[in-house]
Amino acid sequence: MTKFTSKETITQTLETLKQPEEVVEVRILKTDKGTVSGYFDDNEKLINSIQKYVGKYDIYVTLNPTKDEMLARCSNRLQTYAKNTSSDQDIKVIRHVLIDIDPIRASGISATDEEKRAALELIKKIRKDLVADDFPEPIVADSGNGYHMLLPVELANTKDNVATVKEFLGTLDFLYSNNQAQVDVTTYNPSRIVKLYGTKACKGDDTEDRPHRWSMLVKVPEELVLTEKNQLEAYAKKKPKIELSAKSKGKKQGESIDISAFIEKHGLDLAYSAPYPTNATKYILRTCPWNSDHTNSAAYIIQFADGGIAAGCHHNGCSGENWQSLCSLLNEEPVTTVLVEEEKQADTIIKLAENFQFFVNELEEPYAAVQKDNHWEVLDMKSQKFKLYLTKLFFDNQRSAPGAEGLNQALKVLEMKAIFSDSEHKLQRRIAESQGNYYYDLCDNEWRVVQIKADGCHIEAHPPILFTRNKNMEQQVEPDFSVESKKLVFLVKKHFRFKKESDTALFSVYLVTCFLPQIAHVILVLFGEKGAAKSTTMRMVKRIVDPAKQDLLSMPTSKADLAISLSNSYMPCFDNLDSLSAEKSDMLCMAATGGAFTKRTLYSDSDETILQFKRCVGLNGINIVATRPDLLDRSILLELERIPKDERKTENAIWKEFEKDLPQFLGSIFNTLSAAIPLYEEVELDEVGRMADFTYWGYAIAEVLGVGGEEFLQLYLTNQDTANEEALSSQPIAAAVIAFMKNRSTWSASVSELVRELEAVAERERINTNVKSWAKDPNVLSRRLKEVKSNLEEIGIFYDIRHAGDYKKITLRKQGTAAALHSISPSKLQRPTTDTIEDDNLLSLDEELDYCN
């Protein structure tokens, strides 16, 4: 087998395909270093350059010589991650017409011996017929998985000549392709690359029944005689002429005709019938009905699924014959059926997508990675962008637009390839973690990412497939990696105005944790009076972490719309909020810690669309918009101070200064994260905040920033205490319990009795009871107490409910000092809420189940 990779074998190939000193491109696809390409006029240097790739990758060469100036791209050497390869306008002259016969099989795998034999039988038949039709003897080659036939020509690279080659190949396909092997109709373009004969075909895995085989020249005529253009044109006319008109609804319409019965009725000499790739059936006649001297199976009848019928004979003497003349010859009443030509657009699109990588994400949704220049781009196969990309490929190849039906058929096949492939990638938006390293998508046209590792960070031009994008995502600036980690606190102090000095350090740590996609994230809650630049501050945070065309969002009205907003953005920021419903608070909690939302797929009965997310959520408002205890538990509350009149700047000046510092922000954040990775593994804490991952990572990050891990821990726990006070003050039941236990250490009675006691406390303390979160029923009280249980325990109030015969007994007890209770002012306990309804004491199904349990 090694003889096929010898210099003599490949030299013979090059001397056959090109003239001395002509330039050809060598192209090697799907290597571990992207596309490898180079331009050569020196055969010896070409052969030496490819040696390390032979047997490992498919190696191709341009079928036709390129223009001499192409040598300046990469002269007599190979370049990895090649950005530019040959296009049709780069070709000097058309020297070969490639007839590529491939056995029909799944894409991306080698052929079996049986499949390859089918290609051999087909090319033998085509060669025999062409030679019989006075075509010169062609070059025959074994491509490894099929066979090639090269017709030497000398044609100028013009649109007219390209169209002639295209029509010629289309005729061969029409006349010869069958259900085992077919003529590739896409090889007409001048910049077509072809296997470098003498190298190995390496599609798929090398298995016993589908091995990798060496390609080779099988037969090269002693004298290469050119095929003339008029020969190609004449042969193209052998394709049956198909008229396009409305179908008749008469009983003699095409779909009602039984061609097998028609052939038997008239005693036609049927050689065989076979499926035809364009959704049709071929009936090949051994003896021509128009001329009995034609006995080489040149006559045919073709019936399409839509009722169209074509008939004819390949011989020149029968060039005018068709279905209508056959009916007249056999004294059959002429029928009105016409054959509608199908351009096999779906087949063309599928072939054009052959080099895509198809896979599914973790939710088994289909995706395709397409190689553009020197990088891969990931496209959702159900997106409009993917459809437009396929349309572009088809238009570039055919110079016409595909029909909707052809495009949809191709999409179904390509989606099938993705769904039933063995490849799965977990895709993220903006930030991803893989094998302990972190990747940040810059969202630029080259699909570059920042890679963050324990030993440093850099921009990676060829990252693993990790990301998907949407149209709202904006490109990020390149980070300045020369900036030290400790400068982050200085930059935060320069551009953000927090009311408490200590919040600067806490916020700096928070910023870095936003670049950790795998952890549960705290929810950033910004609040402050009018003129405190809440929206501008939120926009700056969004610009640092996840720049977007629409940076701030209004809170959607429905749960489904909120789920979509959370799914589509790594950092969804909701602006200028007054209040949050319980349902939306719950969904934001789920978004912070990780969760999924399912809904029925549009226009389907049983399919579900799953929206999965773990997000960095931001909220802002004049007051603290988060009021429910579970949401406050997951939040950090940062108050912004009002900007004095003498310090106010124009928005343009603010953003100009911020954008100037943005590369430094990113550089310091990435350097901080890199240094924190090894420290995180060593962190051990005796006390941990509600968000444990945030606490551990925050400790390590604070050490790197110079804030200090212990200082950060104290800042975070203090902020949690503030959130706990806010949770208690926003819940009227909690406020009433605190007031009730103010001068007691323990109390025990029925739950019904506690309802009455709390009603009295509320009246005395002027706590609003006309709200949904108040409880006028023992069952609802149990539910409301459970919601604030952890918050009450934080200030030393514990309760226990037990069955006591025919009623439920509750015991309240106070532990620790009374200082914690007095730290919450009466005004806070009586804070009004907008959560009012007319009748809020009816149990929901969840509450009933919870009470019964």
Image (cartoon, rainbow, N blue to C red):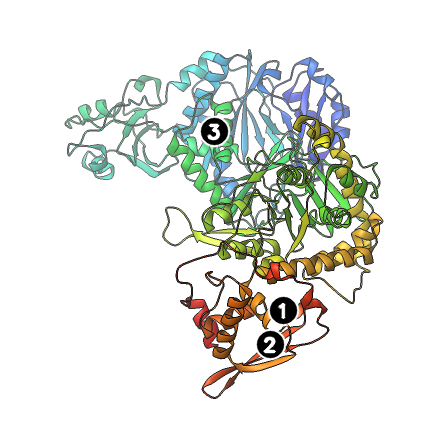
Query: Residue 491 is drawn in which quadrant?
Result: top right
Q: Is residue 784 above or below residue 236?
A: below
Cβ atoms under marks 1 and 2 closer than 8 Å: yes
Say which mark, if any, is on residue 391: 3
The amino acid at mark 3 is Thr
The amino acid at mark 2 is Tyr
Residue at far bottom of view = 805
The number of callouts visible is 3
Nearer to us in this view, 613 or 502: 502
Task: Name the mark nearer the viewer: 3 or 1.
Answer: 1
Say which mark, if any, is on residue 792: 1
Say which mark, if any, is on residue 799: 2
Among the two numbered marks 2 and 3 on one chain, the one whose residue lies closer to the N terminus: 3
Nearer to us in this view, 665 or 156: 665
Q: Is residue 586 left or right of residue 198?
A: left
Gap in Å between the C-alphas at discs 3 and 1? Answer: 62 Å
Q: Is residue 771 above or below residue 850?
A: above
Secondary structure beneath dot 3 equals helix
Query: Residue 87 is drawn in which quadrant?
Result: top right
Nearer to us in this view, 473 or 42: 473
Counting other residues with Cα less than 10 Å from the Cα at mark 1, is it few (<14), some (14-19), or many (20 or more)? many
Return the x and y of residue 466 as percentages of the image width and height.
Answer: 64, 44
Counting other residues with Cα less than 10 Å from the Cα at mark 3, is it few (<14), some (14-19), or many (20 or more)? some
